[in-house]
């Protein structure tokens, strides 16, 4: 079963534990700012542990099956409307450093087998000059301005090289 509505209670452990935290997180810029710029960076190690614990609650094979079902649903929806889809595989900073992503390999194989366009950003991120600006923030999983720039250029180049469908 694919859950199509968000249960915010799973997210609450990542934000400042105060009364009405979800309301504040959704409607207070000050709360959101303090949470994302101060609280989470100060507890970044704990945040990573919570993220990994959530990830490991589901078996790897089940995670892929869920992902494939969501992907198939998206692909069917856009195809029904005559819209193309490109799956962009975003590596983690650790995968870039390692030079390999098992998940990207498995997902690319699935996309190839089902006729879906797929672009991995791993190689372009790996070949980004070490002397340049970092692609990821040091305290979380997000890209820096440079990371967004490299990704945007790679996606633009990929889309420009494709024939319109």
Image: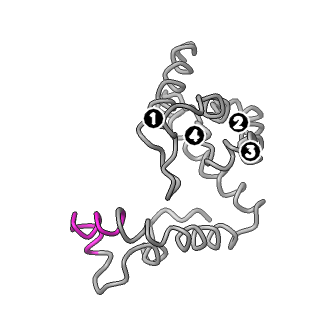
| Tag shown at residue 98 | 3
| Tag shown at residue 77 | none
Badge 4 is on which residue? 76
Q: Is residue 36 above or below residue 94?
A: below
Q: Position of residue 79 (x, y in %)?
A: 54, 32
Badge 2 is on which residue? 111
Distance Cα–Cα, label 3 vs label 4:
34 Å
Distance Cα–Cα, label 1 vs label 2:
28 Å
Seen as rendered, the residue at the extreme bottom is 19
Magenta region, residue range: 23-36
Badge 1 is on which residue? 146
Whichever of labels 3 and 2 marks the residue nearer the N terminus, that label is 3
Q: Nearer the viewer, mark 1 or mark 2?
A: 1
Residue at 61% over, 46% down: 71
Question: Could you tell me how many numbered marks the image carries?
Answer: 4
Q: Nearer the viewer, residue 16 or 65?
A: 16
Q: Magenta region, mostly helix, strand or loop?
A: helix
Whichever of labels 3 and 4 marks the residue nearer the N terminus, that label is 4
Distance Cα–Cα, label 3 vs label 2:
23 Å
In the image, taking residue 40 as reference, residue 164 lies left or right, namely right
């Amino acid at each position: 079963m694919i859950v199509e509505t968000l249960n915010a209670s799973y997210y609450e452990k990542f934000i400042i534990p105060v009364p009405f935290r979800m309301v504040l997180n959704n409607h207070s810029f000050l709360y959101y700012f303090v949470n994302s710029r101060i609280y989470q960076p100060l507890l970044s190690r704990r945040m990573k542990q919570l993220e990994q614990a959530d990830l490991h609650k589901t078996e790897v094979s089940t995670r892929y099956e869920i992902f494939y079902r969501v992907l198939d649903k998206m692909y069917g929806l856009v195809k029904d409307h005559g819209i193309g889809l490109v799956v962009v595989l975003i590596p983690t900073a650790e995968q870039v450093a390692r030079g390999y992503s098992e998940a990207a390999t498995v997902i690319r194989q699935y996309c190839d087998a089902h006729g879906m366009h797929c672009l991995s950003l791993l190689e372009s991120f790996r070949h980004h000059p070490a002397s340049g600006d970092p692609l990821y923030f040091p305290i979380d999983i997000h890209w820096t301005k440079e990371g967004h720039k490299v990704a945007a250029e790679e996606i633009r180049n990929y889309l420009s090289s494709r024939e319109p469908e």
